[in-house]
Amino acid sequence: MSRPIVVGSTLTLVQAACGLLDPGSADRVGCLPEYEEVQHVAAAELANHGVQDAALLVRVKGRTVCRLFFGSYGPATRVPTASAAKWLSAGAILAVIDRDRLSLDATTSDLFPDAPPTTASITLAQLISHTSGLLWFSRCMGRPSYTLQECAEQILEGDVHFPAGTGFFYAGPPFTVVGAMAERAMGRPWEEIFRSLIAEPLGMSNTSYGSSSNPALSEGEVVSTLDDYGAFAEMVLDHGRRGNRRVLSSDAIQEMRRPWSAGVPVVSSPRGEMPYGLGAWIEATDESGTGTVLSSPGIGGFVPLVDFDRRMVFIFETIGDLERIWPAVTEILRQAREAADAAAP
């Protein structure tokens, strides 16, 4: 399939015969006419910030309105998701809960009876909302000399920043613990849990946690593609459904959109006072407090976002320094929102 290529500051778009002719096609390369300015802004912003390889997907109300590939990137390009993996992991955990094998109120001691008193009462919800108090990092995470179970046990035996539920500390170890809890509840390794409950139902054949028996569920070697992660985000937007198939319950999505960190002191956060749900940041809420804009940006440049009010999915991917390219991403997103608002009936 042909794709846009950035040459200096110029975007050359070669249209595939089956692409732009179908306004609903998921295989489009380019943008619909009413979203052409998004394409121009994306090309200019990436050139201005020295980004050669990148990809962008924008879907609005179930239609692919922009699907762009820059430089060497194409549909099969697998990119490290970094912290965007947290959203995928939380989705798999919620799928386990949907099967009544775990609950958000389950404590670490329910699955790890030998957990010490300081960590025994941490709930699953606290783990994936960063309110568990567990330390920000553990040397065992992702190391192949450990299993996920062994690493979780080591994390639970360590120190804590604060008692569970009394603060927000953005960290990776809680996701290792919750993944080990899921393994015990399901009797299967994490990669198999994710594949059977999330990847296969959504057709995410290019998303993987790697081959290690100790994957880092919060970052590490988790890779995905533009379209794979787009399928996951679209499922979230559609309240747990993907087409005619239900992947997560509507209750699970509602819990994901709940600002679990609201009301607790922020001890450490890369996004200030922004509240956190289950696996995703809550950038905006409605009058009831339910998240209307969810995101899970990774430090390497993988940025997924769901906007419920606009019925929009926005996925941007590259490999680089997110802080350096963040102004470009936010400007592209601003233009996508502006185009969606202008196109709304």
Image (spheres, helix red, strand yellow):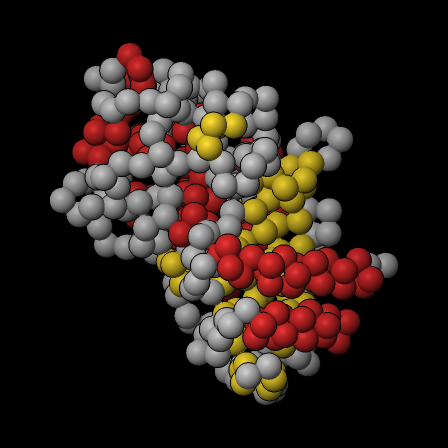
Placement of 183 over or under 14, stated as above or below: above
* Residue pictured at 28% horizontal, 55% vertical: 210
Q: Is residue 229 left or right of residue 145?
A: right
Looking at the image, can residue 201 be seen? no
Looking at the image, can residue 14 be seen? yes
Q: Position of residue 11 (x, y in %)?
A: 60, 82
Q: Is residue 104 left or right of residue 3?
A: left
* Residue pictured at 50% horizontal, 71% vertical: 51
Q: Position of residue 338 (x, y in %)?
A: 76, 60
Q: Is residue 60 left or right of residue 67?
A: right
Q: Is residue 219 left or right of residue 285?
A: left
Q: Position of residue 235 (x, y in %)?
A: 56, 50
Q: Nearer the viewer, residue 281 or 97?
A: 281
Q: How many marks?
A: 0
Q: Position of residue 86 (x, y in %)?
A: 43, 43
The answer to which quarter of the image holds residue 206 is: bottom left
The answer to which quarter of the image holds residue 76 is: bottom left
The answer to which quarter of the image holds residue 250 is: top right
* Residue pictured at 18% horizontal, 33% vertical: 150
Point out the residue furthest to the right here. Answer: 345
